[in-house]
Amino acid sequence: MKKIISLICTSILLISTLSRCQQVNKKSTTSLTIKPGNFTFDVKPETFELFVEKDGVKESASLPMEKEKVTNLVKTKQSVSWRYPNKKMDIDIQKKKNYLDVTLKSSGSTKFVWPTVSSPSYILPFGEGKMIPSNDVNWKKFLSNEELSFAESFSMRFFTLNKRKYSITYIAKNMFNNTVKFNSNSSIKFAFEHEFPNINPDKTYGFRIYVTNKDIVQIAKVYKDFVVEKGEFKTLADKSRENRNIEKLYGAPHIYLWNNEAISSENINWHLFQKELDSEFFQWTLTLMKEHYPEEVDEYRNVLNNAKEQTYLDNYQKNSLLKALNSVVKLKQFYNKSIFTKLDDESNKLINKGISKLSEQELYTLNKHLLKVSLGASIDPISKWAKNDSIDLVNDLYKSGIKKAWIGLPNWANGLMNPVMVKQANKLGYLIGPYDSYHSIQKNASIDWNTASFEDKGLYESATITNKNNEKIKGFLGRGRKLNPTLSLPSVKQRVGAILQSGIDFNTWFIDCDATGEIYDDYTKAHPITQKQDLAARLNRMNYIATKKNMIVGSEGGNDFASKTIAFAHGIETPVIQWSDADMRTNKQSKYYVGGYWSPRNDIPERYSKQVPIKELYSEVYLSPTYTVPMYKLVYNNSVITTHHWEFGSLKIQDEITNRMLYEILYNVPPLYHLDSKEWEKNKKMITSYLKIWSPFHEKAVQKEMTNYKILTKDRTVQSTEFGKDLKVIVNFSDKNFNYRNEMILAKTAIIYEGNQRIVFSPNN
């Protein structure tokens, strides 16, 4: 060892000054030991191998790199630092009161890998949080050769190594441009790689490293203290002081309401309607379909021609005709003065205003009146149109005992087409608002994909993201491009203002993608931006909608960089399960196929309504309670309300509905449903009986911190959570009864304790 040290000093003498070399303790080894708080650490500069020692137990905090030449090695009472001249990296470790502060700085390196870690098990904030044994067969398979974006795949900015006697937690100081690379050839290991883009002047990254007991609650507390210290924590109570509607989320299930139709089948007298099919009006609808829905026009033409010759219409024909009417009634081009020669007072008033000057809501009002004038007695009065899936459904939710709900509409057009429903939902005390997105842009987006269409047509060429290979980054599903968020705010203001200009009673807004961590460096010469700037612009546009438009804002994902801005998030509890699995996404013959985004019947698309099983591996890693730990809730329970991604709502996965109800109570998670009148009638009894238990519990629990979490059985199937001082839940996920402190916890049961009150919930009963 003395020989190694002397060689290091000789090397330093050749490059640096004698005085600098003399700062290294000649009696030390290549390990430099410092005591920060209740643990010590050793570091070997040549390999950047880091050890920590607590209570006499020494553990590896990072695996060794290949040996590197070291210069400028400096040790003081408070720090140790050195340089890798060949790697063009400077390393600095500072002694703090209760953690190590590690900073890595590039002086020319384009990327650097550190740390590489190995541990018997890990706590990784995948969604809510996962406890992952390094030799677990499921996780070894799932993580084999995976490369994950740290900003996107980690809901919080840390990872924890569970060692024999204690845990080591790394908190990333720079969340951007990091990739976590897994290797599970033997046991699971991973490496943390940071890239230094040439467009980014910040050439540093680093970590705070904490040593704690092997206690999930303590680990979460360490991270929460870090977030609070940085001024990044905001409670729901704080948010509600700015907008009292936040409190409408307390005890509220999350419901996507599929009122896709302006007019529905029950509004049509099909016998009289059929007599109109030979009119100029229907020839006009054919022209409009050909121009604006070319992929559907052939089917419509065939149905229209055949229907004229028949004495009856079958369901397929009715559906095709109805779908065409609901499509063309959205078009700005719908009004044609040579077709609509008779007008009622409302349509006359709106036409006189000027079609180009109408708001979208006014346009839909005009087109509905034009439709009614043209088809006369063959269709109901407008006030009766499509009530089953809109205002009647909303009223029945309330009559059935659901006094609070977040209601999301798949598109803002669903609300603008039916403002009476929106007004009624608001009157009943619900939150209601649209899904919206500014992530992708298409050059010629269809009217059904209006989130990818912008008033400023120059954005497609002047405001989209270019990667470092000078390629445009493709939009969702490979269509169009990704929009640079720093150039989006004028379009956000224009779109939101246009939607709201006629007074629609939206009080919540859901923004796709912005809280997922899918962020980019833009290398476009005219508007280069870093990932940090990308993220700041996303938060800024959500904040604009929240503060300037007084909306309760939620987003996809829910990664904690957005926690001060959003009130709720869809995706932390169950994310999109395995995008890349063909059996789930493209193989329509597979029992695992989740369904398409589009419904030929204008009802809920199968992607959201079709119940499917998932493969055993995915069931284990995504859903099994044996791996899930409530890290997010221990930090953010009373700050952000989190639930499932809308593609995997509470009723989506076969054979998991019971477990997910239990999970939603244990972790204080709102159920997420997709409803139209058919799905509501099918599931009404189950939903209402469940919400009688869940809603009052959530209303209390969400206003408290999650204060404790315990695993009560070795197989981890019986768990408990605590909220505040007097609210506790025990859930038995197993198929066997469990005796806990002389109390029998029945299989598949949740028990809620509040003071002396005890409420038992069994989904199967």
Image: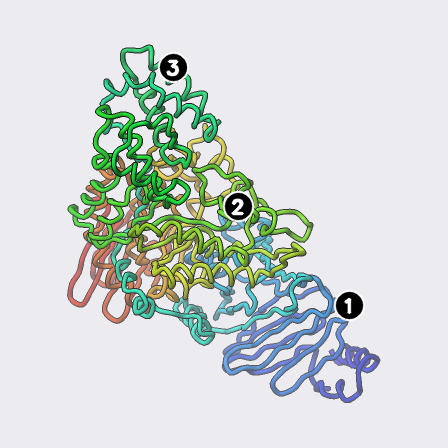
Q: Amino acid at mark 2?
A: Ile
Q: Amino acid at mark 3?
A: Asn
Residue 681 placed where, x, y %?
22, 37
Q: Amino acid at mark 1?
A: Asn
Task: Give the labeled residue for mark 3.
Answer: 305
Disc 2 and disc 3: Cα gap in Å?
Answer: 37 Å
Res 654 visible: no
What secondary structure is found at the residue carrying circle 3? helix
What secondary structure is found at the residue carrying circle 1? loop
Q: Residues within 10 Å of mark 2 (few under 14, many from 20)?
A: many
Which of the two residues, 129 or 276, is positioned nearer the viewer here?
276
Residue 490 placed where, x, y %?
49, 56
- Is residue 176 positioned above or below 81 on the image? above
Which tag, 3 or 1, sits closer to the chain's start?
1
Q: Which mark is residue 1?
A: none
Disc 2 and disc 1: Cα gap in Å?
Answer: 43 Å
Which tag, 2 or 1, sits closer to the chain's start?
1
Placement of the N terminus among the 4 image quadrants = bottom right
Which of the two residues, 587 or 279, is positioned nearer the viewer here?
279
